[in-house]
Amino acid sequence: MPLGEGFPALRSTPLLILGIETSCDETGVALYDTETGLLADVLHSQVMLHAAYGGVVPELASRDHVRRLLPLLKGALEQSGRRIDEVGLIAFTQGPGLGGALLVGASVAAGIGLALPCPVVGIHHLEGHLLSPLLAEPRPAFPFVALLVSGGHTQLMRVDGVGRYALLGETLDDAAGEAFDKTATVLGLDYPGGPALARLAEHGNAERHHFPRPMLSSADLDFSFSGLKTAVLTRVRELGSLDERARADIAASFQAAIVDVLAAKCMAALEREGLDRLVVAGGVGANASLRERLERATRERGSEVFFPPARLCTDNGAMIAFAAALKHREGEHAADGFPIYPRWDLASAARGPQSTP
Ligand code: KG4
Ligand code: ZN
């Protein structure tokens, strides 16, 4: 029997939603009440687990999700002061992500769903990121342009409503977060290097090196970051041994290049779509330099930019529970079984369950 069958009345009643995120290297569990808002949001980051390998080891990630998920759920229930049998809907990240990691969240969600019983819905990870700025005040109104910048994705989308997304442009190679992480590795910083590179850049001279701004003046809204990463690598090899100052200058110059491109494309997207609101989501959205630049550029244009609080920028269960709350309001159906989609584009997710891969 499909997990959601027999629960039609939930749509109009207040609902406690359990959100579970296990797509990559963070285990996130949250409880969201459709009447009172976010009640609990707990997270375990596997950063230390993977650091020794310089990147995420999928099998270790899955095993750690198995270990962490139920204790985190217990913690979330304690934080919220609610009981598990009060949960009326369970939302889990269905994709994209690491297959084994996704399966952990999906099977725990399905298991609890059967035991309670209550319906279970699969959420697209990027949709979670995309809608997360609506969890904070001030809330952006639809329609808006969204910049999704994470470790795996760099996309500009037009968002006309929940489930109404149009892809405007995306990276042709590396994601922005990936470029940050790979450049950080070149500079000898520990994985994941994005935040560490940003900290190093604070003390550097961004004018010291002029790195390429790939596709800055291309007529489209696409990105390319692999050439920028190679340019940094070439410069580091030319310079030989680097002291702290030299590394900080490279970090600042790299960050300036990537921020220039991201900001220029965001502004071009607003212009092209005739919109005045920009929403930034995904891990790289925590970057202070990107935030400053977009705040300035949108102010000068008479537009607005919305960022989720830094805590919500990286992977978390709150955005999954919240996306489920919004989709539920729109009448979205519950999952049939618990399939996962490790490779899944948001446009096909938005077209509905029949067009999922
Ligand atoms: O959205 P996210 O938590 O995970 C997914 O990729 O889905 O994004 C993680 C990415 C990593 O590449 C990380 O280095 C980057 O976001 N990141 C940052 C900053 N904080 C996180 N990049 C630049 N500056 C930051 N402050
Ligand atoms: Zn993410």
Image (cartoon, rainbow, N blue to C red):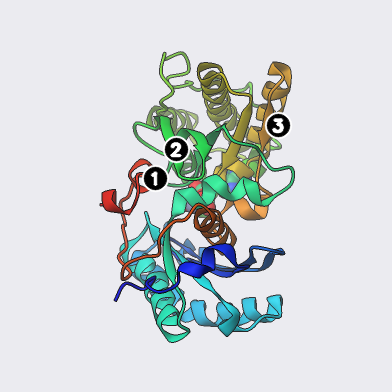
Amino acid under disc 3: Glu
- Dot 3 crowding, Cα within 10 Å, few <14, some 14–19, many 20+: few
Looking at the picture, does residue 229 appear above or below residue 14?
A: above
Choose mark 1 or mark 3, whichever is in front. Answer: 1
Amino acid under disc 2: Tyr
Q: Secondary structure at mark 1?
A: helix
Q: Residue 19's x, y, as percent? A: 53, 67
- Residue that label 3 marks: 292
Q: CA distance from mark 1 to mark 2?
A: 7 Å
Q: Out of 33 and 92, give the one closest to the viewer.
A: 33
- Dot 1 crowding, Cα within 10 Å, few <14, some 14–19, many 20+: some
- Residue that label 2 marks: 165
Residues marked 3 and 2 touching at CB (< 8 Å): no
Q: Residue 73's x, y, as percent? A: 56, 78
Q: Earlier in the sequence, mark 1 or mark 3?
A: 3
Q: Residue 48: in sight, yes or no?
A: no
Which residue is pictured at 43% across the width and 86% down the height?
115
Which residue is pictured at 56% across the width and 38% down the height?
242
Q: Residue 228: in sight, yes or no?
A: yes
| Count of picture labels | 3
Q: Residue 168's x, y, as percent? A: 43, 28
Q: Is mark 2 within 8 Å of ligand 2?
A: no
Q: Secondary structure at mark 2?
A: strand
Q: CA distance from mark 1 to mark 3?
A: 31 Å
Looking at the picture, does residue 78 appear above or below residue 195?
A: below
- Residue that label 1 marks: 350
- Dot 2 crowding, Cα within 10 Å, few <14, some 14–19, many 20+: many
Amino acid under disc 1: Ala
From the image, which quarter does the N terminus lie in? bottom left
Residues marked 1 and 2 touching at CB (< 8 Å): yes
Q: Earlier in the sequence, mark 3 or mark 2?
A: 2
